[in-house]
Amino acid sequence: MSSSPSKPEHTDGPVVLERKPWLVDRVLRNALVAAFLVRLIPLLVWMFDSCLRDECTYVRLAFRFGEGEGMTGSAGWIWAPGYPFLMGLFAGTMGWPEGIKVIQLPVSLLACVLVYQLARLAFPENRRAARIAAWMYAVSPHMAFFAIRLWSEVLYGTILLGGLLLLLRSRDDVDRAVDRAGWVKTALVGLIGGICVLFRGVATYMLPIWMFSVLWGRWREKKAWAQVCLLAVVAASTVAPYSMYASNKFEGRIVSDRTMGQMMWLGNNDFDPITFDYGNGQLARQAFKRTKKKGRSASKCGKKTQAYTRDKCQTEAGFAWIKANPETFVRRMPMRVAQLLNPHSLLTRHLRWGRFPGMPQWFDELIILFGCLHSMGTMVLGAVGLAGRGRRSQAVLFSLILLYHCAAIAALAGLSRYRVPLEPLLMIYAAGVLADPRAFFSQIMAEKWRGVVIVAGLCMLIPLVFWFLPAGWPWWRTW
């Protein structure tokens, strides 16, 4: 005798999350074991693989940190200090900045747990969604790749997830007046927000979105405004010491990084927007030189050693180009976003260049195919799930963060790497659809506007996701 399926509850009240969910949920524990193995095995096999391109820049910056030089410019860029500083600790103490890879592995496991907890908040009535989201993160080839290479994505992405979870929990705790827990969490949110800025300059303009989500549905509550003020003060206090140091050292105003000018040069120039993904970027040195000759010369803005002056000049030149070519600027926006949404990532480039030696070709192809399908499914199904099942301040927060990053890329230049910290947010809502398709369709039928948003969104999203899809295969130009 079968029982009829129970109707999912759509509660708006606070959800009590387990402090150690990996101890009580066997499915999550299995996902963590899988995530550990998927990252540990390639890490051990290729632990001493040499750096590649921007990874080598991180290594150089790390050694300078280790030698006491502090933050320095590199090739005309002034990057955010967070990741080079942590690598510098390894360089200074061990002479081995690549040792940060050992830290990234457990951090990626923490990210898996955070994805699980955020999915529990989004879908409190269905634990299966959290389990699916955790598994999606655990087996993602792209997430695994960045965990074992010298990129800031895993550390930054985990810090971001932790900040978002604390932000959402602090709202509930302050509303329920649970001792001082909500205010302590709000202060921690400000601290984490400041750390995000020190890892990625783009996070500077994400903080207002965090504050907006705190106020969402609570515009007339004094405690909500007090939360925003506390968050802003702590975040500013976290960033201010480095900002003052860097501004003094480089003789110009710097919050965290100075990279907009270089991004302007890449994306707002006489040549098509430059990216560095496999199959749709200027990866060969000669091809890059030929491309540069078609646009304005970067050297007119000064030497690469004059990083701040050069970046400021490049920013002004970029805005001047936009004013002179407004139609071209707007027409290129879809291309830039398509570069961001390219379902391949630097993992594809790494495999195509033979940087994971020893694996058979068929296995390389399998990883590329699975990674591509995984990211495509995450982006498309995640967007559909967010529009169809997103609720309360969490959906507002995630939607604005995603739209903000797309808008920033649309105005500058795109690269699939910039999407890596954002995919876990979409995994949560993709898991919501997979966990309970019936609830998804029921909500669309009950709120017709969601269906309209989904159709309109897919009409824009699918062409952008498919734009560079064939680029991961060498024979794509013959299709």
Image (tube, rainbow, N blue to C red):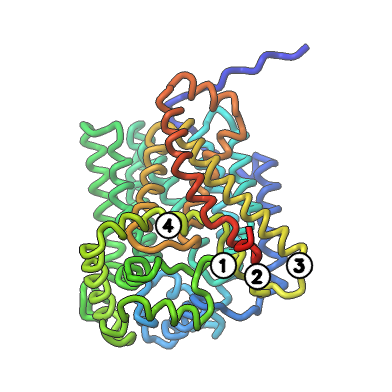
- Name the amino acid, label 4: Met
Residue that mark 3 sits on: 361
**From the viewer's perspective, is 251 left or right of 114?**
left
Element type where label 1 sits in the image: loop
Residue that mark 1 sits on: 278
- Name the amino acid, label 2: Arg
- Name the amino acid, label 3: Gln
Q: Earlier in the sequence, mark 1 or mark 3?
A: 1
Q: Residue furthest front?
A: 478
**Vertical comparison of 163 with 26: above or below:** below
What percent of the width, then of the height, locates residue 31? 67, 48
Q: Give me the C-alpha separation between circle 4 and circle 2.
A: 23 Å
Residue that mark 4 sits on: 335
Q: Quadrant of residue 320?
A: bottom left
Q: Give me the C-alpha separation between circle 3 and circle 2.
A: 10 Å
- Name the amino acid, label 1: Tyr
Q: Earlier in the sequence, mark 1 or mark 4?
A: 1
For the residues carrying marks 1 and 4, which lies nearer the camera in this image?
4
Is residue 144 visible in this depiction of the protein? yes
